[in-house]
Amino acid sequence: MIRIGTRESQLAVWQANQVKNLLSDQGVEAELVCIKSEGDVDLKTPLYEMGVQGIFTRSLDIALLNNKIDLAVHSMKDVPTQLPEGIAQAAVLKRASWKDLLIYKGDSFTFDDQLASSDAIIATSSIRRKAQWLNRYPRHTIENLRGNVNTRLRKLDESYWNGAIFAAAGLERIALRPHNSVELDWMLPAPAQGAITVACRANDHQLLKVCDQFNDTDTALCTKIERDFLRALLGGCSTPISALAVIAEGKVHFRGNILSVDGNHKVEIDKIVPVNEAADTGKIFATELLANGGQEIADGIQKKHP
């Protein structure tokens, strides 16, 4: 019996069950083991103040290394770009939507020009979303919003805020996307947003082979490029770095950016490369971004968040 480690939230359990079903398709029996993460315990402190590398994955990593579970299932955007020694990426599932959503109150978010001229209050715990939002709407105020998807929806409903930003994939997976939501096509996602990854012990060769059967190679390539870009920029949840790689007609279309925390400064990159030449381009794109103004922003962030 394979033990699948997961966080306790409705979304995390849904994701773990997808892996359980994929294993079942191969005749492999599995059970879920729920483990509470540090990120689930402290729901008040903004993520960027918590030293957040692995805040949602550390507890599962420890359980994996201590042989309390055999697989760990994560939202890939939460996973540090450097896995702990002894742990390997076993599979990446086919990506769902990479987009962010604004869930709004009333009907004041119909037109972009209306929004830009307002003094709205928007909630999010993501420094990446905060920076991109303030870059587009500098008059707005950003409030901190923590908790699992269900908790954040409840907090929004009970609040005085005008709206809050969520990942589309998380809401859609558990059928909680409300009608009063709009996709933020202009907002670049966190690297690997919308993807689910499976990790196991690096020496568990049999399980690595089993999981490879449901690894989605296109998603694995795109998320590798995005995460290499993030790692080369020394980014984490406390850095406003975004990246998106999409495969179309045999080519990888990549967009990435880095912003100052207040959203006042932004440097972007937009590239197209053949799929067969794309595997190691994340670091190359990051180097180019840094050379074209990104280094100054990165240095400024490091001074404020060493």
Image (cartoon, helix red, strand yellow):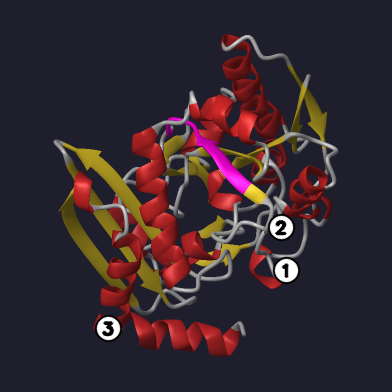
Which mark, by number, is residue 50? 1
Magenta stretch in the rendered image: 88-95
> What residue sits right under mark 2 in the picture?
55
Residue 139, can we see it? no
Which secondary structure type mostly characterizes the magenta part of the structure?
strand
In the image, 71 versus 247, the foreground residue is 71
Give the Cα distance between marks 1 and 2.
8 Å
- Residue 246 falls in which quadrant of the image? top left
Three-letter code, disc 3: Ala
Pointers 1 and 2 in contact (CB under 8 A)? Answer: yes
Frontmost of labels 1 and 3 is: 3
Q: What element does badge 3 sit on?
A: helix
Position above or below: 134 against 169: below
Three-letter code, disc 1: Met
Three-letter code, disc 2: Ile
Position above or below: 271 against 76: below
Residue 109 location, x and y as percent? 40, 46
- Residue 131 falls in which quadrant of the image? bottom left
Give the Cα distance between marks 3 and 2.
31 Å
On the rendered image, what quadrant is the N terminus found in?
A: top right
